[in-house]
Image: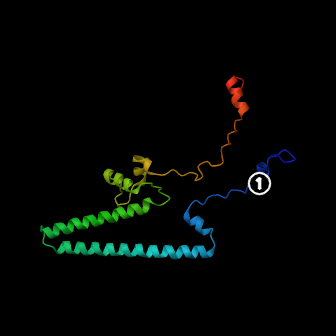
Amino acid sequence: MADTNGETPQATQQQAPAQAAPKSWDEWLSGQDETVQELADSHVHGLKSALDSERKQRQDMAKQLKALERNAEAGSEAAKALGELTARLEQAERQAAFYAVANTPEIGCSNPRAAFLVAQASGHFTRSGEPDWKAIRAEAPELFRQRGSANGGAGTQATPKAASMNDFIRAAAGRG
């Protein structure tokens, strides 16, 4: 259906300007009103305090295990068991720290477990124990997301013209 000036109703409608998507959680949150920011801060504060508490407990447990290992009789079964338990705890700490960094937007790792296994197998850790992200990314680039648009190209392609019966008849007759 055409207007009096020959335009379709869809063509006369004006679209609202698209807002740019925020690049990070912090950017989005800074654009929210104060009540939303306070709610988010209180929620995150509870999570951070729980995480800090867990980390402190693990550190205390590691210290206790090392003290027990020093006091155990050298070469005894208890000393061996304590040594193995200490090593497993340190490995779990290293893995948890790796996962925490891998999930940040700057790193963009889509499969932290696989990335940790690659880093561990290939020795992609610095002397200080930090992951060497450049080396991990070079060895397994498929484990990292590509930054891009979230809309997937929506609205960027023209809609195909609907074929009419005349178009089909002309095509069958070889004149179309």
In the image shown, does 70 or 45 lie closer to the viewer? Answer: 45
Seen at 20% across and 74% down, the residue is: 68
In the picture provided, is 6 more to the left or to the right than 168?
right
Split into 4 quadrants, where in the image is the C terminus? top right
Picture layout, residue 175 above or below residue 156: above
For the residue carrying disc 1, how many other residues have a C-alpha within 10 Å: few (<14), some (14-19), or many (20+)?
few
**Circle 1 is placed at which residue position?**
14
Q: Looking at the picture, how far across and down is residue 154, in whole percent?
A: 63, 49
Picture layout, residue 7 above or below residue 39: above
Q: Looking at the picture, how far across and down is residue 45, in whole percent?
A: 48, 75
Seen at 40% across and 48% down, the residue is: 140
In the image shown, does 107 or 1 lie closer to the viewer? Answer: 1
Name the residue at the top extreme.
174
Quadrant location of residue 67?
bottom left
Q: Looking at the picture, how far across and down is residue 91, in whole percent?
A: 30, 63
Q: Amino acid at mark 1?
A: Gln
In the picture provided, is 64 more to the left or to the right than 53?
left
Seen at 61% across and 58% down, the residue is: 21
In the image shown, does 42 or 138 lie closer to the viewer? Answer: 42
Question: What count of labels does the image hold?
Answer: 1
Picture layout, residue 38 above or below residue 116: below
Q: How is the image coloured?
A: rainbow
Q: Looking at the picture, how far across and down is residue 112, in whole percent?
A: 40, 56
Check disc 1 and report its element: helix, strand or loop.
loop
Seen at 17% across and 66% down, the residue is: 80
